[in-house]
Amino acid sequence: MNKTEFIAAVADILEISPQGLQGPEVLEDIGNWDSLSIISFVAMVDADLNQSVNPEKLKQARTLDDLAALVGL
């Protein structure tokens, strides 16, 4: 998965269009970043990338780029 595919997957979780998303967008400003989205994100990372997300680092993530960095993108 590359960064563009990753952003599209996160946009799908957030139920928004990935159009125009590049990475520095603040999750809270995008909308729909809530506990269900967080669970869906963790599940997506596990299923699609075979990785585990560090809960403390996820809690500190503020942007799409922060999420990408959590999985090495």
Image (tube, rainbow, N blue to C red):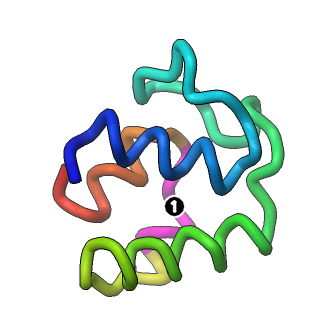
Residue beneath the point at 61% across and 33% down = 26
Up/down of 7 relative to 46, above or below: above
Q: Is residue 38 magenta?
A: no
Q: Is residue 5 above or below residue 29?
A: below
Give the percent coordinates (x, y) of residue 11: 60, 42
Name which residue lies at 55% across and 68% down. Answer: 41
Which x, y percent locates residue 54? Answer: 38, 82
Identify residue type, mark 1: Gln
Q: What residue do we see at 42% from left, 70% from top?
A: 57
- Residue 72 percent location from the top left of the image: 17, 58
- Toward which corner of the image does residue 22 lie, by quadrant? top left
Circle 1 is placed at which residue position?
60
- Element carrying mark 1: helix
* x, y percent for residue 15: 75, 45
Q: Is residue 68 left or right of residue 59?
A: left
Quarter of the image for residue 36 reads bottom right
| Up/down of 69 relative to 57, above or below | above
Query: Which stretch did the figure color magenta?
Result: 57-62
- Left or right of 62 on screen, residue 68: left
Q: Nearer the viewer, residue 23 or 18?
A: 18
Q: Main secondary structure of the magenta part?
A: helix
Q: Is residue 16 left or right of residue 66?
A: right
Give the camera-side residue of 7 and 56.
Answer: 7
Decide: few, some or many residues near mark 1? Use Cα within 10 Å; few <14, some 14-19, many ≥20: few
Tally of numbered discs:
1
58 inside magenta stretch: yes
